[in-house]
């Protein structure tokens, strides 16, 4: 039997607890229906006998207290709500326990912004990690030593797993079920819970919002210029000249403020504009390409695919809100 420990930290998001609890429990039911033995012991782990969640709306009673559980095989770190720095401070007692379990051979998986509590352990240093795209900038500032790969739905790095935002955590749970219980059981769970079993990127769901949460006013002006002139061909040299900064200093300051190179930022602004056209308009891909400042369809498709994980046509077919073209 594999022991699954679902942590119940203060400020935990209830759905982030219930989804893995229900999924791993269902695996046992599926295996029994197949004439096999149950595989998992699933327990909720808390610091106290009762944990109030969602501003006290719900009360969860853990199966066992943190101090009483000495050994587990998989630790699930759920997403948390509210100010994440405060949430980490309220759950510090979990940190040495997670470290001890990992060093003793357990695997650890964070769901959505549960990555913040996992990263606070130091176990993610130099490793890949994903989290909700909306929290990416805060994560990078708080944990610069972690290799954040926000475009991925999930990561698997030396027994440490993470998932992207919100309900994409279900994809990581299915991944772990397949690893422990096999493909057939994972497919059954996929059908039962109606979860797409193979989805590796959250790029199509990212809404690029400019990343202006910094104190460099000159770089903010550059960002606004790019966003207002995305249909033009804008070069790094043109921008550094326009704003009176040497190219080397300009590129360094821009990357430090936005976590993107100038070229990456410009591409993201252009592709975000293209996405909106594909979602709400009837223009052809070529027309949209020209409007956002590209003249080479191959280059446009390459950049679009790199940022969203799909082609412009695939994106339109999935997200367009207009019924006829």
Image: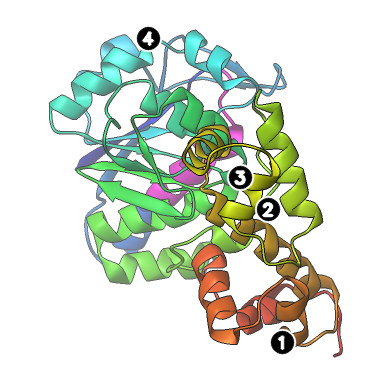
Give coordinates of residue 63: x percent, y percent. 40, 23
Residue 21: in magenta span: yes
Which of the two discs, 3 and 4, sits closer to the camera? 3
Gap in angstroms between the C-alphas marked 2 and 3? 27 Å
Q: Secondary structure at mark 2?
A: loop
Instruction: Reply above or below: 231 against 143.
Output: below
Q: Sequence order check: which comes first, mark 1 or mark 3? A: 3
Which of the two discs, 1 and 3, sits closer to the camera? 3
Give coordinates of residue 47: x percent, y percent. 42, 11
Gap in angstroms between the C-alphas marked 4 and 2? 35 Å
Which of the two discs, 1 and 4, sits closer to the camera? 1
Give coordinates of residue 315: x percent, y percent. 65, 75
Q: Sequence order check: which comes first, mark 3 or mark 4? A: 4
The circle drawn on residue 207 is 2
Question: Among all residues in the image, which is located at the extreme bottom?
Answer: 325
Tell me which residue sits at (48%, 20%) in the image: 9
**Residue tagged 3:** 240
Give coordinates of residue 43: x percent, y percent. 37, 31
Contact, mark 2 vs mark 3 (Cβ under 8 Å): no
**Residue tagged 1:** 286
Q: Secondary structure at mark 1?
A: helix
For residue 306, side relative to residue 33 (left or right): right
**Residue tagged 4:** 93
Q: Sequence order check: which comes first, mark 2 or mark 3? A: 2
């Amino acid at each position: 039997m594999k022991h699954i420990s679902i942590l119940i930290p203060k400020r935990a998001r209830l759905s982030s607890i219930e989804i893995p609890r229900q999924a791993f429990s269902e695996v046992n039911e599926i295996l029994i229906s197949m004439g096999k033995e149950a595989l998992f012991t699933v327990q909720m782990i808390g610091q106290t006998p009762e944990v109030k969640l969602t501003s006290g709306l719900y009360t969860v009673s853990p199966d066992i207290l943190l101090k009483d559980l000495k050994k587990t095989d998989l630790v699930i770190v759920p997403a948390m709500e509210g100010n994440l720095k405060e949430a980490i401070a309220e759950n510090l007692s979990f940190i040495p326990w997670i470290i001890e379990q990992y060093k003793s051979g357990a695997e650890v998986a964070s769901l959505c912004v549960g990555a913040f509590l996992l990263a606070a352990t130091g176990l993610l240093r130099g490793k890949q990690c994903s989290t909700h795209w909306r929290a990416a900038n805060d994560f990078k500032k708080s944990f610069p030593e972690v290799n954040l790969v926000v475009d991925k739905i999930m990561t698997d790095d030396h027994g440490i797993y993470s998932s992207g935002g919100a309900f994409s955590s279900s994809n990581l749970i299915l991944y772990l079920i397949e690893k422990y219980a096999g493909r057939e059981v994972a497919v059954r769970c996929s059908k039962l819970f109606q979860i797409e079993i193979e989805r590796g990127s959250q790029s199509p769901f990212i809404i690029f919002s400019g990343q202006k949460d910094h104190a460099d006013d000159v770089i903010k002006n550059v960002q606004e210029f790019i966003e207002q002139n995305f249909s033009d061909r804008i070069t790094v040299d043109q921008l550094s000249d326009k704003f009176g900064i040497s190219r080397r200093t300009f590129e360094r300051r821009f990357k430090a403020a936005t976590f993107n190179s100038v070229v990456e930022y410009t591409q993201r602004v252009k592709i975000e504009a293209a996405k909106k056209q594909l979602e709400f308009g009837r223009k052809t891909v070529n027309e949209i390409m020209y409007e956002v400042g590209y003249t080479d369809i191959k280059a446009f498709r390459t950049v679009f695919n790199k940022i969203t994980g799909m082609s412009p046509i695939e994106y339109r077919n999935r997200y367009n809100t207009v019924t006829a073209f």
